[in-house]
Amino acid sequence: MINFKELSKKYKTPLYVYDFENIKKNYLELKDAFKARKSLVCYAVKANSNLSVLKLLAELEAGADCVSMGEVKRAMYAGIPKYKIIFSGVGKRDDEIEEAILRDILMINIESEAEFDRVELIAAKLEKSARISIRVNPDIDAKTHPYISTGLNENKFGVDTENAKKLYIRAKNSNYIEPVGIHFHIGSQLTDLKPIEEASSIVASMLRQLKVLDIDIKFFDIGGGIGIKYEDEETIKPYDYAQAVLATLKGTDVTVVCEPGRYIVGNSGYFLTSVLYEKENSSKRFVVVDGGMNDLLRPSLYKAYHAIEAVNAKGKTSKCDVVGPVCESGDFFAKDVELPKLKNGDLLVIKSAGAYGFTMSSNYNSRGRAAEVAIEEGNDRLIRRRENFEDLIRLEKEYL
Ligand SMILES: *Cc1c(COP(=O)(O)O)cnc(C)c1O
């Protein structure tokens, strides 16, 4: 058991705490589920890009799925080899494409015809060949929150199957584009296997059609998106996930690539925040805490549920909203949750905060970002110090 009270005394709040053993366990479980085939687990860096988290995964031989050159550089800095790095994302700048080609990463995931044109042009200018995969949009309803659903034609992501095929034929005939992968990613926080199975089957059938055209794809990239338990969701088991995908790939000899983010780190992280005071008006009880939406945005952005536990506080509970100090009505962590009477200094632990927590944090209201701590073999260590006032003004003060 992690001693949250002690950690909050030692490092102060607001604070992120990550259980590295749990990250390791999740990674190995998923990797193991695909053991019937060659596979590469490319961790989605955007979920939690702390260098120490990336280093832990690098040591476990994970690859990285990146959506900016900043993430590619982080992954490499932490020791993930270039040949295990994928560059995805719907909008890549020319200089990012150029650097991805020069750094010779595994592949660039192309999301549109216009992007294909840019990559080809830039590779030609460099007199290099760019390894690519194309993100196919299989037009599948992932049955998740609309903001994190990406597999329908109405979303901005990927290329429909007809156009994807045309692009592969262009790639085959290009001196500067080498098609090595095929990719799909239908959404995040997926809790239903069916849409993944359907998407995989559609994309696998395309893989076979490409083979007939003498386009030999080596990497079958199934994206990320496996959901975790935030409240009482039924989640997908890694074994079932792998079996469902592998069943669609009979008779092929591709390497399966997956890009899990949330699954690896989500339930391995906790956000610790201290109570400042309670406040009550005629209709509502508010618990005001020292963490805010700038630290953990998911409740504000997606109305996401995070379980909250009051450490040490006991007694009769009543309904309240847990709110932060930021000047927005959207600054809350929970609405109408049952908590005991709380006082200044009492500690709250917000669970399942390891993914899209710190990485989405900002300096809004000139609040320094929280510190991050790792728990490893029972020991705690700081992996990012708390931002101070000097950090906040560093890039501006010389222009006064
Ligand atoms: C966000 C994203 C992922 C990771 O999603 P999770 O839900 O965290 O697993 C993987 N691949 C791509 C292309 C993404 O955009």
Image: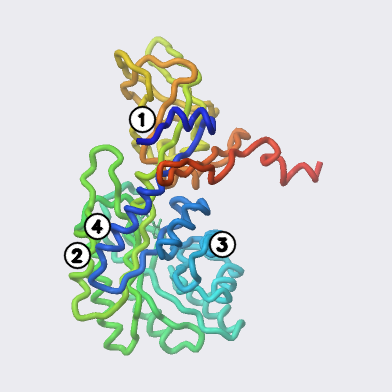
Query: Which type of secondary structure does the marked residue at label 1 adopt?
Result: strand
Tell me the distance, in whole angstroms, between the alpha carbons under discs 4 and 3: 29 Å
The reply to whether residue 237 is in sight is yes
How crowded pointer 3 is (Cα within 10 Å; few <14, some 14-19, many 20+) is rated as: few
Mark before the other along the chain sequence, 2 or 1: 2
Q: CA distance from mark 4 to mark 2?
A: 9 Å
Q: Position of residue 165 (x, y in %)?
A: 34, 79
Picture disc at residue 243: 2
User: What amino acid type is highlighted by mark number 3?
Assistant: Tyr
Q: Name the residue nearer the viewer: 105 or 142.
A: 105
Q: Which comes sooner in the sequence, label 4 or label 1?
A: 4
Mark 1, residue position: 308
Query: Going from the N terminus, do you reach mark 2 or mark 3 first?
Result: 3
Q: Which mark is residue 238?
A: 4
Q: Position of residue 25 (x, y in %)?
A: 32, 53
User: Which badge, 4 or 2, comes first in the chain's sequence?
Assistant: 4
Horizontal placement of 273 versus 152: left or right?
right
Which corner quadrant holds the N terminus?
top left
User: Alpha carbon of mark 4 to alpha carbon of mark 1: how far?
Assistant: 27 Å
Mark 2: secondary structure = helix
Q: Indicate yes or no: mark 2 CB to ligand 1 under 8 Å.
A: no
Location of residue 314 in the rendering, given as x and y in whole percent from the top left corner: 33, 16
Q: What is the three-letter code of the residue carrying label 1? A: Ile
Which numbered disc, 1 or 3, marks the residue that appears first in the sequence? Answer: 3
Image point (26%, 73%), residue name: 37
Q: Badge 3 is on which residue?
A: 77
Helix, strand or loop for disc 4 = helix
Identify which residue is drawn at 30% across, 50% down: 227
Rendered-image quadrant of the C terminus: top right
